[in-house]
Amino acid sequence: MAKRDGEEVRVFLMGDAAACGKSGQTVPQGFYNLERMLRVVAQAGGEVGVCASCMDARGIRDAELAQAARRSSLEELADWNGWAERVLVF
């Protein structure tokens, strides 16, 4: 969706998904690399936020985040939900 004209995409990683925002992911051949997928979202103008509380609970430092991701907050998640026409959760 981020590649479509007129579409804006925002991804918020929380809970165990916060680890998906780490840089330097090495996955077995044939498996998807979420760091690469988040980079595609950012290159298309999308935003990637990672829950700060979830990062702290898992020992993830800001410096460990993928270039496309940044520390965020539940307050920003609430703002994004208010902004969104559609919200997908999985």
Image: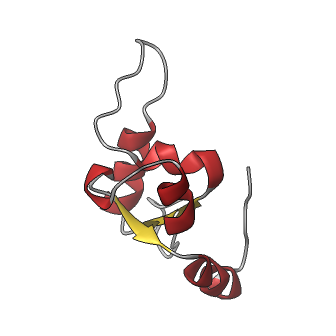
Image vertical order of residue 12 relative to residue 7, above or below: above
Image vertical order of residue 52 relative to residue 26, above or below: below
- Which residue is painted at 61% across and 76% down in the image? 74
Q: Quadrant of residue 89?
A: bottom right
Q: Quadrant of residue 11?
A: bottom right
x, y percent for residue 41:
42, 57
Q: Is residue 36 left or right of residue 77?
A: left
Q: Note whether residue 9 is visible.
A: yes
x, y percent for residue 78:
66, 83
- Which residue is painted at 31% across and 43% down in the image? 23
- Which residue is painted at 61% across and 45% down in the image? 16
Q: Is residue 22 left or right of residue 24?
A: right
The colour scheme used to paint the residues is secondary structure
x, y percent for residue 69:
37, 60
Q: In the image shown, does 45 or 35 lie closer to the viewer? A: 35
- Which quarter shows the N terminus? bottom right
Residue positioned most to the top: 29
Report the label total: 0
Q: Is residue 33 left or right of residue 83?
A: left
x, y percent for residue 2:
48, 61
